[in-house]
Structure formats: C-alpha cells, structure tokens
Image (cartoon, helix red, strand yellow):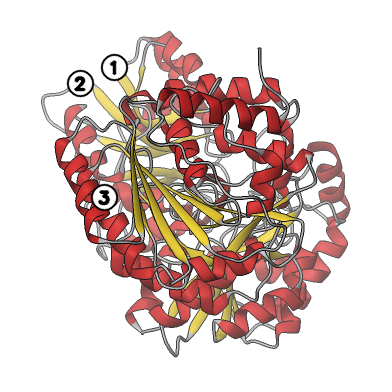
Amino acid sequence: MLLTDTTELQEVYARHISSKFPALYKKTSVYSDKPCRSVALVIPVYSGLDATRICIERALRYKNAWTRIILVNDASPDPAICRLAKEYDARFSCITLLSLPENCGFPTAANTGLCERFEHEDVILLNSDTLVSKNWVERLQQAAYTAENIGTATPFSNNATIFSYPEKDGRTSVPSETLCDHLNDLAGEAWDGSTPDVPTAHGFCMYIKASCLKDTGLLRTDIFAQGYGEENDWSRRAAALGWRHVACPGVYVGHAESQSFTSVKTDLIARNLKLLNSIHPGYDALVKKWQDQDPLLPFRRALDLRRLAQDKPNVRSVLLVTHDRQGGLTRHVDRRGTFYLTHNIVPFQLKPIYSGSGKPLWQITGFPENIYPNLIIPRNPHALKALLTSLNCTALEIHSYIGHTLDKVLQLRSLKLPYDIYIHDYSWFFPRITLTGEDGVYCGEPTSKQCQTCLETCGSNTGETTSITRLRANSQSLFYHARTVYVPSHDTANRIKRQLGVSAIYRPWETLIGTEWPHFPIPSGSSHRTIGILGAIGLEKGYTQLLALARLAAQLNAPIQFVLIGYSCNDRALLETGVVHITGRYKEHEIQDFVRQHTIDWFFMPSIWPETWSYVLTQIWRTEKPVIAYDIGAQAERIKQAKGSMVVPMHLPYPRLLSFLYNPMPA
C-alpha cells in the first residue's frame, strides 16, 4: 500500500533507517520556522571515480561558509570510491560521510543524507557527476527565497530535461570545467533575478527549503526502485501543499548524467514514468503545456546573446531571410553565408517556426552551425529590431517570404536596413511557385484573373492566401524599395519584368564549369541506350512525361532504359514498366559512381516548369555527360549558353522524343 501522508511517510522512513542502520540515524533538533540559510549539501556516491572526485573537489572549492557536505556512500562496489570518500571525510571537517552497508539506490541514499541534516538547514541534492562553479549556492538560495512559497530552485545544465541549455529539452555533452565556469559566469551576468515557475524540480541539483522539506517529507523509496522519477513525484506532492518550484537561470551546473545506473536507465525510465502518471494523473499533460509555453526561452536567449557577444566581440552581421523548406534556395543561402564569413561578417538566417502550441515565431539561426539555438522571438518587427540591434546587423538579404507571409516580410522595411532580394522561384507573383497548374503543366502565365481562378481551384503552395492582385502589389512595393533585386538567369529576369514591372540584375548562382561542351558522342558498337534522370521527380519536374516515355519504351520493346538517380512521386508505377531502375535518395558525391555503375550515356531533364536556375544541371555536367532538356526556363538558357547538350520542344510527341533520346542528332 502506498503511503500518501507526508508526515507518516517521513516517520516510517526514519524508523526504517534507524532500525536497519542505527549508526547512521541522528535525531535532529526541533524545527524552527525562522530560516538560517545554512545549507546541507547531500551527494550520494556510487560509481564514476573521476567524476565523483571532480564533483567533490569543486563542491568544496565553491561552497560558502554556511554550507556543509554530506557524502552518502551507497555501498559502492569500487574500492577506490570508498577510499576517496573516507579520505575526504578525514581531511575536511565540513564533510560528513555516511556509508550504507548495502546498495539501496539513489532515493534511499538521498533520504539518508536528508535525515542527517539539521532541521533548520536547507538542502541541496547534488549528483556525483556534476560540475558546480562559484556563487552557485548563493544564487540558488537567492532564487529560493525570492518568495515565501517557493520550495525548490533548479539551475540550468547541459543535460537536465526542461532545464537544459543551450538545446531546449536536449542533451549536450558535458562541458569542460573551464566552459562550465564560463557559462556559469555568463548566466550570473545575464540573470535579472527572475524565477520562472516550473512543473517539477530536477534531482541532479535541487535546492530545497527546510520548511518545504518538512511539509513534503522525503523521497519515496517504496515505488521508485533505483531511481528516476522520485524527484518528480516529490515535486508534485510539494506542489499539492502549495509550494512552488522555480528555475534559477543565474546558475549553470554541468551534468554527465546517470553515473550510477546507466545500464538499466531505459527500463527504469519506462517503468517509473508509468508509475508517476498513475500517481499524479495529468502529469504528462502538465509538463507538455509548460513546454509549449516555454517560460525559460527568454533566459536561454539572454544567455545565447551573452555568449555571442563574448565569442564575437564587435560583431557585424547580416540577416538572410529564408524559408524552412529544402531545395536549391538552401544551397544558395549556404553559399551566401560562406561568402560573408570570408569577409568577417557573421551571417544569420531568419526562419519561420512555430511554438508547441502553434504560435508563429521567428528563429535566427547561426551559420554554418546553429550554436545559438535560442534566438527565437515573436513575429513582429519590434522584437526583431531589438534582437538585430544586439547583433549589430547592417543589412538584409530576402530570399523567400514562404512560411513568414508576405505581409510580415513587408514589415521588415520598418527596420530601416538596406536589403537585397534574391529570386529563387515565382511565388512573388503566383503562389503556385512553379507556374504550373494542378496537372503540373506550365500555365503560360495567363491574366491575373485567370491566375486567381487557378489559385482558388488548385490552392496555394506557399501558404499565402491573399489575392493575386494584392500579392503582386505587395511584391512590387517590396522590390521597389530594395537596394538590388538579383536573378540567376535572363529568363527569370524577363518573367519578373513582365509580371511585376521590375528590372532585376542578372547574377548566376554558380560559375559554369566550362564555356563549351562537345556534341553528343554516339558510342560505337552499342545498340542499347541508358538514359539518366537525376533528382526528386514530381509532377512539375516531369514525372508524367517520364512515365509516358517508360511505358512507350516497354510497349515498343525499345533498346533503351532509364536510370533515376533519386526518387519520384510514384516509384512503383515507374518500376512496373520494367525499363526504369531507381537508386533512391543519394548524396551528391555518389552521382558519378551511379553513372559509371549503370553506364549512363547521357541525361534527360524532364522538368516542365521554367526553373530560375538548376543545380541538377550543374551536377549532371560535373559527370561530363551531356543533357537533353525541354526548351523552357533557365535550364534551357544555360544549355544554350554553354553550347553543349540539347533542348527539345515542350510538346514534342512521345514517339519522336523517345527516338531522339535514343539517337540524338547534333545540331
């Protein structure tokens, strides 16, 4: 039967300890409501010799005069740890050593230490695999005494579930001692004294007021076995009695985690979480709601900014506004980031994200690695301006409004920063992006009225729901005030000029590999052709055309086969033709190997939309194979400029196209 009365639980536990281990139990003095702010630091030890030694050494170095240490040796099987604990007990008068004759697990070891403390003492439960730094006790105590009803305070750590930093709820490898000291210093500098409420404390480093401990009692040992979840249960019991639990953002404590029961941790987590939710119904929902609200974000963000200011003093930055999707835009933005780094300017990306509750947010991410993951703000220019001011941002590059909404991107003009626009698609005047209808066929760019009808019929691919007329007016306004509008091809420039009346500057995204390419070689002595297709082939990339060609080749028993290096929107239908081989997803460096493995003669690009650029074309040319493509968009423009490969009319009948793919004739 579970004990639910906290006083009864504490008394039963005290009787159990005193009868089983009489040498360990000391009856404490009468409780006083007047806090003396003295602290008993309880450290259960079991395994991990080096981590334990460092933990105790740092606890001794950084404790204050009102803090004493209680070591609890939970019957460690390591003689070196037992000797270490005895040495510290003998050398330091501020250390008390309690040694259990048999291993009982963390909750019992922790309770043994709690029973050793004086009733007027606050307590800190500390894991033996932690790295504390200066002023940590004082700041935790300050947080705990911010309000009378605060019962516990828990610091930030690299690995402490909801208290983790820099990754939210994540796990970062334990920092070095030097880095822990640095992060703790920065946390103290950034902390404004606020103590955000949390649903539970964390037992890796848990400051507990004496009065809260008296009310709540000890950790449960009857149901939480070797550990994990016992502090969550204790926290919810304390909360039921009116005690609050808070985070202390002014302290950072390194944490290696689970020195004592690594091998069984997974099973313990599953078992004890199930028990926790049965004892405290709604616990998971409570934590999930708190995580969605993320009250610790402002403190993680402040710490990120402190780190950034120290890592990159006098930083000068530029902000690249991009979407949260994959594709060629991501590749180009990465290139722009590299460009700025070579010029000692720090590039940041502005991406649209959503909170756990669905609230739209902005995240500023670093480049090339996002080592400051908490630069997250509401989607409004005032919050963005404040953040960009701290980053000393001097200019913007707008690469996409997708995910942000065009209205939000328009508001960026209020930042009063110069900005350039880079055109990667046609979402600026038609939210179908690729100028294709529901069937994936190029629309021919009809009137605005027809575009509106298409949008209402087929839907938006950008999330933008405004009318075509307003979309184009907003884009024109944004383009008009830009410093420069860049396009990667003349074809793109012509379409932007025709639809929006804006002149753009031609700047290829990549440098062509060569100025001329040889005519198609026709291999002698071979009557069979292998045609390569590269990329992710959806409707606008020519899936319908490829499937029709494959079915025709199979029907005619033509000596031709297709190798799709990549995948399609319906691989099964292509494979059923018997003339298509599909490699699946690939890495760029693997393309040449696939070309050799399948003895590909040349490539066909079935894309039927006017691409603004084509990284796929560049990748094909790097294999030194020619390309056949439809005469549309930047892909055709580049082929013609390079004077190699070939283009074919968009509406060439499939029999003639298949014949041409088998035996292309040089121009």
* Amino acid on which the number 2 mark rests in the picture: Ser
Secondary structure found at label 2: loop
Residues tagged 1 and 2 counted as in contact (Cβ below 8 A): yes
Q: Can I make out residue 348 in this image?
A: yes
Q: Is residue 335 above or below residue 51?
A: below
User: For this view, does 152 lie left or right of residue 345?
Assistant: right
* Amino acid on which the number 3 mark rests in the picture: Ala
Residue count near mark 3 (Cα–Cα under 10 Å), binned few <14, some 14–19, many ≥20: some
Residue sitting at x 66%, y 51%? 31
Displayed quadrant of residue 539: top right
Q: Which residue is mark 3?
A: 51
Q: What whole-number distance in Å separates the C-alpha atoms at marks 1 and 3?
A: 68 Å
Nearer the N terminus, badge 1 or badge 3? 3
Residue 583 position, x and y percent, is 33, 26
Residue sitting at x 33%, y 59%? 175
Secondary structure found at label 3: helix
Displayed quadrant of residue 533: top left
Closest to the camera, between mark 3 and mark 2, is 3
Q: Residue furthest left?
A: 525
Residue 401 position, x and y percent, is 68, 62
Of 648 and 252, the residue lying toward us:
252
Residue sitting at x 32%, y 79%? 342
Closest to the camera, between mark 1 and mark 3, is 3
Secondary structure found at label 1: loop
Of 636 and 399, the residue lying toward us:
399
Residue count near mark 1 (Cα–Cα under 10 Å), binned few <14, some 14–19, many ≥20: few
Q: Which residue is mark 2?
A: 527
Nearer the N terminus, badge 1 or badge 2? 2
Residue 213 position, x and y percent, is 64, 46
Q: Which residue is mark 1?
A: 559
Q: What whole-number distance in Å separates the C-alpha atoms at marks 1 and 2?
A: 7 Å
